[in-house]
Image (cartoon, rainbow, N blue to C red):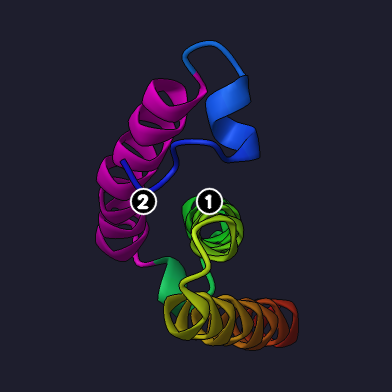
């Protein structure tokens, strides 16, 4: 009901579609990052799954950020933005470690 009358509500099935996208991302991201841990990507062997996990996490926080602002929940939007920045910093650190280990 929060999104009623928003731009997302104008798209037929937009609210339902966004819910499914968020749910799928919130399910897939931990699985991908768990695979990265199992493959020991943090040891510099490969970076495929951790990179994918960071990209999907950033995408999720951007979606949540814009959704929070659509419903004028600015506190949640700010938190989502901070999480997005944290993902960017972690991704940068992960990339730096991977390139140094080669």
Which residue is tagged 2? 29
Which of the numbered marks, if any, corresponds to residue 74?
none
Q: Main secondary structure of the magenta part?
A: helix
Displayed quadrant of residue 27: top left
Q: Secondary structure at mark 1?
A: helix
Q: Quadrant of the C terminus?
A: bottom right
Position of residue 71 in the picture relative to residue 28 (left or right): right
Compare residues 23 and 13 and report the one nearer the observer. Answer: 13
Residue 86 sits above or below residue 5 on the image? below
Q: Secondary structure at mark 2?
A: helix
Which of the numbered marks, if any, corresponds to residue 56?
1
Label 2 close to label 1 by CB (< 8 Å):
yes
Residue drawn 64% across the image and 88% down it: 89
Compare residues 23 and 34 and report the one nearer the observer. Answer: 23
Q: Is residue 29 magenta?
A: yes
Q: Earlier in the sequence, mark 2 or mark 1?
A: 2
Residue 50 x, y percent position in the rendering: 49, 61
Tell me where the magenta segment starts and ends, as one range. Answer: 14-40
Residue drawn 59% across the image and 53% down it: 59
């Amino acid at each position: 009901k929060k999104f009623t009358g928003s731009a997302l509500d104008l798209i037929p099935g937009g609210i339902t579609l966004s819910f499914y996208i968020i749910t799928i991302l919130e399910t897939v991201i931990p699985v991908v990052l768990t695979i990265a841990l199992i493959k020991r990507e943090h040891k510099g062997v490969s970076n495929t799954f951790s990179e994918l996990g960071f990209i999907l996490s950033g995408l999720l926080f951007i979606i949540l950020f814009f959704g929070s602002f659509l419903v004028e929940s600015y506190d949640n939007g700010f938190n989502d933005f901070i999480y997005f920045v944290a993902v960017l910093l972690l991704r940068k650190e992960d990339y730096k470690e991977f390139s140094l280990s080669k």
